[in-house]
Amino acid sequence: MRLNSFDALNAFAQQLERNISGGSFKTKVIVTPSSVNEKGVVIKVSLLKTYIPAQPPAAMRSRELRLRVSVAGTAESMTGLKQAVEAVEALDRYLITPGLRLEIMNGSRVPVGISNSRIIQAVSAEDSFIDSPDSTAVQDVQDDRIVIITIPQGGD
């Protein structure tokens, strides 16, 4: 199965929504730009770049998508802070899964892995989690990570 970058972006957002929800909160996954203005914390998926990496001519051509995946929003109470921490932990657990690949839903609504795809993440130790240290009423939450998805080239 070959996907273009836009389809891969949306498939990844749906994959996150399927695999990280649970626990005591359901966190919404949105692809930006979006008119969705959720109260509390959401997971935002933003396309930063799509490109064909330089490879030896004999290698199978692929396309890479560089995405920003952010747990973002506001924590207005300890419950909101708990939701934010749970969302970050769920992302961490999922994105370190060995052999993680992009999935799409087949006709029977069952996720199927895309052959020759892979998902890796990079997390910076410098990223901020709580942004408004002087406020006691509302805290801005922003936890970013870069995710790189490799898919077989096609549909360009």
Image: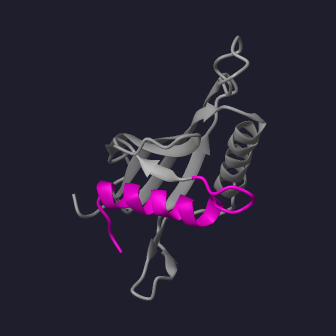
Split into 4 quadrants, where in the image is the C terminus?
A: bottom left
Residue lying at the far top of the rendered structure = 134
Location of residue 137 with respect to 103 vertically, above or below: above
Observer-nearest of 74 and 12: 74
Can residue 143 be seen here? The reply is no
Residue lying at the far bottom of the rendered structure = 108
Observer-nearest of 60 and 112: 112
Observer-nearest of 75 and 155: 75
Residue 23 image-quadrant placement = bottom right
Q: How many marks?
A: 0
Percent x, y for residue 111?
Answer: 51, 77
Q: Residue at x 53, y 40 (%)?
A: 39
* Left-right relation of 38 to 48: right
In the image, which residues are magenta? Answer: 1-27
Residue 34 image-quadrant placement = top left
Percent x, y for residue 129?
Answer: 67, 28
Split into 4 quadrants, where in the image is the N terminus?
A: bottom left
* Left-right relation of 51 to 77: left
Residue 133 image-quadrant placement = top right
Location of residue 53 with respect to 131 vertically, above or below: below
Q: Residue at x 34, y 41 (%)?
A: 33
Residue 16 colored in magenta in the image: yes
